[in-house]
Image (tube, coloured by chain):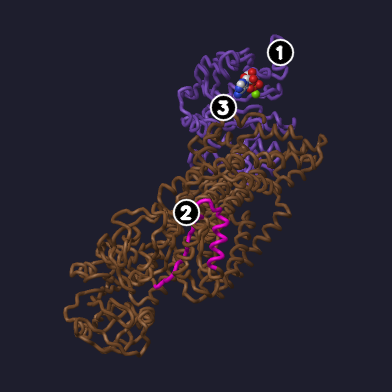
Chain colours: A brown, B purple
């Protein structure tokens, strides 16, 4: 029987190209993910630990309730040990820069200065000097010689450094300063970390031991290798999430592959039913037939998987190179293909192929030997199993729909997910009823318009409901997920931005960090698209409570049109309105009395702490004029129209103040940032789902090819009766496009329902959900589906048009 | 363009071949299925083509019907030379000017009898002549069976549906390649009777390939083929004449 299997595979090799390609793509996806993940881990080790592993001992403060840093004296105590050679000390802390609501890492320079190349200027050498990373320089508009000012004081920028090689800097803007300046800017005292080398001739272990003894319980002492491991561990937490995220999409791709394989096997085995019956008639046992067909699946799965692993590794290599070249994230320089990235995808591919082939294989083994003798009557009567399936499917649709509705209205996410999954499986199971029905619904009109080839395409599609259903299902999975993500993202975004607008009292606040905003800037702000009202706020810098050099602005009466809600509530002559965080930092409480003074003018004020205040410190314009008669505009507040393009407005505002150091904040930048994150995520997800769509298109092509082989005589007959080649190709294109459109229509409806139910279940009434259907994206999906359908029909149509009309007369 | 309805006694030619040669394959393995055939078929005439297996009968029929193209020589249908036509033109010709009935597999399984019968008209985008459809289907005894699918029809009924379809476009020539080959003797006799009626009553030109001397005897004329060449012909033959001629072919083959 093995010989028979191999002979079958050889003679019918072309028929296995489609399912083989489906397995290959799914497996390649898994292999790419695993390879990239391994490469990322290896690269992260280099990036995360830097030179950490090279030190003998790495010392940090003992964990627990004690101080978070080592005492100042620790450096000397370690340095004086005879077992210890070089010692490097690091002091670092976090600084919240409220003007740009950003968090910076303030740190001493590393021992190995190559980790922090200086782009311009120099490293800070004394108190009052800092070097900033390129991203800080850009976001604050700073250059060498400018003043870096913070709520805790400021320093002069003496250099700009490149932090891309520094493992500590990931994600945070970095400010490099001397140890004393770090303390001045962040309040951190003592040492964050000490790194020590063993003295000449002293083994590392002895040095570690000596440091441990010297510092006792106040410190945690690790070897360099341990510290490097810990650093990698800390950084790869996110990597595992990423791998899981990617593998989820690989699983979707494999599911679609499985549908394609199951479909192909049932068609191929159905076609061979008479041969199988003949085999049984001449004495093959059921087990032999079963084994032979399963072996076919294994050989196919194994072959395709091995090629898939190769393709996956190549793809990973290409992606790693592209990502390193783009300069985003960690450079993936350490390309690694672990054994697991070969073995796991191969096993997965073989198992998925076998599992998918199992049902059709078992069905074919059940064929009675008598079938060989019966004339080839159409065996189209629906089996009991088929009816059970449809019944279960309808039950799933109704039950799942009910659960989904309950989850959405009650705002219970797990319930929503369960309902969605159950109803989707239901739709897949009931496909053999649903797909032909939808095909008739959407197909009749265009089919009639397209004339005979169109009508025949519709008839051919509807004639094999099960096959049409499984072919369309493969595409349905991808389309539903893409539409769900698109609608879900748009709906979620719209709902959240609605509530963002309520939460932020101003849409855009442009705040100068040094000097005034020139009159030019103020005028240009008014011209930004979507701005319906604006207010210019004069301001001065002065000490407020415990903090020095704060911006205090005067609020004109025109601000009432700009600030929403209760943002300016409580502001009156003689009142200092303080945002909660700023008040806390200044040590001021609600109702406290304080006096502001600028250049000899004193104004006594009562503090009013507010949660909604759009600026840190505000007084009325009159009080500000008393304080500083010549104050220039320091802040501009803008109100946008409700339907304004927030991202666009923020970008324009940023462009106007570019290079002046002014910061743009408020609800609109938040909204713009949210939009950007959501859009990026959506693009990534769509790209990942595109793999499963490609597999589905291969499935449509395969299904069509097989049906062309099956229908050779039929096609020859219609050619003999006068169908032209073009009409024949049109008919096959029609069949493919019809299936693609059916999948798109059903997928769009399902995806829209899920995309609405998702945010509803997620937010659970805390945010009113507003449905937003991104029609342009949906249109794009539909267009892509039609194009994919056409593409899928090209090869089968070419094969079909080669059939000679005279073939209809051939005996068999 | 239409020649149907012309008197039976016409001497005009419905189809003609000139030096027709058809080779399958090329080089030393080439098979010369037709080796210079010159033959004409008169309008309103019922011709049977006979010859041993492999003598080129089917090949001749394919070329006459525009299903395949000649290696050299010409096929003339009415005034048109098929050898100069493109694939598309041939397709159009097949759906408008010729009709066929094959030995088996004549019908599309997913279409009803009526849909099968009207298919060439639909392909050609022509209006259905309901009176003609009624006349043909009644004559062929199909009027009760029009809404059935092929799987619900007997072999004889299926062949009659095929014939009705072939007659629907009032073709210049109706070709039939062993139309009774898959039928039992009673059904086959019925089928031949219908073919004859279509010649008599509708003035249809019919060219039929057959192995059955009884069937050939129903024709006005029998053309004999051997090894891709003409090997004689008979006019208004009896069954015995045909048997004798066939015997002669076999003896010299
Ligand atoms: N498609 C083909 N390819 C190669 N040879 C063919 C083909 N069709 C027919 N032949 C050969 O041409 C010759 C005539 O065949 P055919 O016309 O079918 O004969 P008949 O119908 O008289 O039995 C035979 O030798 C046959 O083998
Ligand atoms: Mg023949």
Say above or below: A206 vs A522. above
SS state under label 1: helix
- Tell me the residue at 50%/46% (across/down): A334
Residue that mark 3 sits on: B205
Q: Would you name the residue on which mark 2 appears?
A: A50
- Residue A801 numbered tag: none
How packed mark 1 is, by other alpha carbons closer than 10 Å (few <14, some 14-19, many 20 or more), is few
Q: Which chain carries label 2?
A: A
Q: Can residue A676 be seen in this view?
A: yes
Determine the residue positioned at 23% across, 75% down: A536
Find residue B118 and report its horizontal and vertical position in percent: 56, 41
How many numbered marks are there?
Answer: 3
What's the mark number on residue B250?
1
Q: Residues within 10 Å of mark 3 (few under 14, many from 20)?
A: many
* Side (left or right) of A761 relative to A678: right
Helix, strand or loop at mark 3:
loop
Local crowd size for mark 2, using a 10 Å CA cut-off: few (<14), some (14–19), many (≥20): some
1 and 3 marks on the same chain? yes
Range of the magenta residues? A187-215
Q: Which of marks 1 and 3 is nearer the N terminus?
A: 3
Task: Indicate which label's residue lies in the foreground, 2 or 3.
Answer: 2
Q: Does the magenta stretch include residue A214?
A: yes
Residue A335 location in percent, x, y?
51, 45
Q: Is residue A380 above or below residue A495?
A: above
Q: Distance between the residues labelled 1 and 2?
A: 96 Å
Front one among A577 and A486: A577
* Chain for numbered disc 3: B
């Amino acid at each position: 029987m093995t010989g028979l299997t191999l002979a079958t595979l050889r003679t019918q090799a072309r028929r296995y190209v489609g399912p083989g390609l489906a397995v290959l793509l799914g497996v390649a996806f898994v292999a790419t993910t695993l390879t990239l993940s391994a490469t990322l881990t290896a690269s992260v080790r280099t990036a995360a630990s830097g030179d950490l592993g090279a030190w003998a001992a790495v010392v940090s403060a003992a964990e627990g309730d004690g101080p978070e840093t080592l005492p100042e004296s620790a450096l000397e105590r370690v340095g004086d040990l005879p077992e210890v050679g070089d010692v490097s000390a690091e002091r670092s802390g976090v600084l919240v820069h409220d003007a740009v609501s950003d968090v910076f890492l303030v740190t001493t320079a590393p021992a190995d200065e190559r980790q922090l190349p200086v782009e311009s200027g120099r490293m800070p050498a004394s108190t009052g000097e800092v070097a900033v990373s390129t991203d800080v320089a850009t976001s604050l508009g700073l250059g060498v010689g400018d003043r870096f000012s913070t709520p805790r004081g400021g320093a002069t920028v003496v250099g700009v450094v490149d932090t891309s090689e520094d493992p500590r800097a990931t994600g945070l803007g970095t400010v490099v300063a001397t140890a004393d300046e770090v303390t001045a800017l962040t309040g951190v005292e003592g040492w964050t970390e000490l790194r020590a080398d063993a003295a000449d001739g002293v083994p590392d272990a002895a040095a570690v031991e000596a440091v441990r003894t010297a510092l006792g319980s106040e410190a945690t002492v690790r070897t360099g290798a341990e510290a490097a491991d810990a650093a990698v561990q800390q950084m790869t937490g996110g990597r595992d999430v990423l791998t899981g995220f990617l593998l989820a999409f690989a699983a979707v791709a494999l599911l679609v592959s499985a549908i394609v394989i199951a479909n192909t096997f049932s068609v191929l085995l159905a076609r061979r039913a008479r041969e199988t019956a003949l085999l049984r008639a001449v004495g093959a046992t059921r087990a032999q037939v079963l084994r032979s067909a399963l072996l076919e699946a294994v050989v196919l799965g194994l072959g395709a998987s091995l090629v898939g692993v190769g393709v996956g590794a190549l793809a990973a290599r290409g992606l790693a190179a592209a990502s390193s070249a783009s300069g985003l994230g960690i450079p993936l320089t350490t390309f690694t293909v672990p054994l697991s990235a070969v073995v796991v995808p191969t096993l997965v591919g073989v198992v998925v192929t076998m599992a998918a082939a199992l049902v059709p294989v078992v069905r074919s083994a059940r064929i009675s030997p008598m079938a060989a003798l019966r004339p080839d009557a159409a065996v189209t009567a629906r089996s009991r199993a088929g009816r059970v399936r449809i019944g279960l499917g309808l039950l799933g649709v109704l039950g799942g729909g009910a659960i989904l509705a309950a989850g959405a209205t009650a705002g219970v996410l797990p319930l929503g997910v369960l309902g969605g999954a159950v109803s989707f499986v239901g739709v897949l199971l009931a496909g053999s009823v649903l797909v032909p029905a939808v095909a008739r619904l959407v197909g009749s009109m265009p089919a009639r318009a397209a004339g005979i080839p169109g009508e025949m395409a519709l008839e051919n599609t509807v004639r094999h409901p099960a096959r049409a259903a499984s072919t369309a299902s493969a595409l349905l999975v991808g389309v539903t997920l893409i539409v769900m993500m698109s609608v879900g993202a748009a709906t979620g975004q719209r709902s959240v931005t609605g509530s963002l607008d309520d939460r932020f009292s101003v849409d855009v606040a442009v705040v100068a960090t040094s000097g005034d905003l020139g009159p030019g800037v103020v005028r240009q702000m008014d011209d930004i698209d979507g701005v319906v009202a604006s207010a210019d706020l004069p301001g001065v810098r002065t000490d407020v409570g415990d903090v020095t050099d704060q911006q205090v602005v005067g609020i004109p009466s025109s601000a009432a049109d700009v600030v929403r809600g209760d943002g300016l509530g409580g502001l009156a002559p003689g009142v200092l309105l303080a945002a909660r965080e700023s008040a806390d930092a200044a040590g001021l409480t609600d109702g406290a009395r304080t006096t502001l003074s600028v250049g000899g003018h004193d104004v006594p004020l009562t503090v009013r702490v507010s949660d909604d205040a759009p600026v840190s410190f505000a007084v009325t314009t009159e009080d500000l004029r008393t304080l500083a008669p010549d104050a220039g505009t320091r802040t501009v507040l803008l109100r946008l129209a409700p339907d304004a393009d927030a991202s666009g407005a923020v970008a324009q505002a940023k462009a106007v103040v570019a290079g002046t150091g002014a910061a743009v904040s408020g609800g609109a930048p938040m909204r713009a940032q949210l939009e950007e994150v959501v859009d990026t995520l959506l693009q990534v997800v769509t790209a990942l789902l595109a793999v499963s769509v490609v597999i589905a298109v291969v499935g449509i092509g395969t299904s069509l090819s097989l049906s062309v082989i099956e229908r050779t005589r039929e096609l020859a007959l219609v050619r003999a009766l006068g169908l032209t080649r073009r009409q024949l190709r049109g008919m096959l294109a029609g069949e493919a496009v019809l299936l693609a459109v059916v999948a798109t229509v059903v997928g769009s409806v399902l995806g829209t329902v899920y995309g609405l139910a998702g945010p509803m279940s997620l937010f659970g009434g805390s945010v009113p959900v507003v449905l937003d259907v991104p029609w342009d994206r949906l249109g794009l999906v539909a267009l892509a589906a039609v194009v994919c359908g056409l593409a899928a029909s090209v090869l089968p149509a070419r094969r079909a048009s080669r059939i000679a009309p005279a073939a209809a007369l051939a005996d068999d | 363009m239409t020649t149907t309805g012309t008197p039976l006694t016409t001497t005009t030619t419905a189809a003609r071949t000139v030096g027709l040669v058809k080779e399958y394959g090329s080089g030393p393995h080439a098979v010369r299925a037709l080796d210079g055939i010159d033959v004409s078929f008169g309008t309103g005439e019922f011709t049977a083509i006979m010859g041993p297996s492999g003598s080129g009968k089917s090949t001749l029929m394919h070329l006459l019907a525009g299903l395949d193209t000649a290696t050299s020589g010409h096929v003339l249908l009415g005034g048109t030379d098929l050898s100069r036509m493109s694939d598309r033109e041939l397709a159009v010709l097949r759906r408008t000017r010729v009709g066929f009935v094959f030995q088996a597999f004549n019908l599309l399984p997913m279409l009803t009898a009526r849909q099968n019968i009207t298919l060439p008209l639909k392909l050609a985008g022509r209006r259905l002549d309901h009176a003609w459809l009624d006349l043909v289907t009644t004559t062929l005894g199909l009027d009760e069976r029009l809404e059935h699918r092929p799987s619900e029809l007997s072999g004889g009924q299926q062949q009659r549906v095929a014939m009705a379809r072939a007659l629907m476009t009032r073709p210049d020539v109706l070709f039939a390649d062993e139309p009774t080959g898959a039928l039992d003797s009673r059904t086959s006799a019925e089928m031949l009777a219908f073919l004859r009626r279509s010649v008599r009553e509708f003035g249809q030109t019919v060219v039929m390939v057959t192995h059955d001397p009884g069937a050939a005897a129903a024709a006005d004329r029998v053309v004999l083929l051997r090894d891709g060449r003409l090997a004689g012909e008979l006019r208004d033959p009896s069954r015995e004449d045909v048997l004798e001629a066939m015997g002669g072919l076999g003896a010299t083959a």
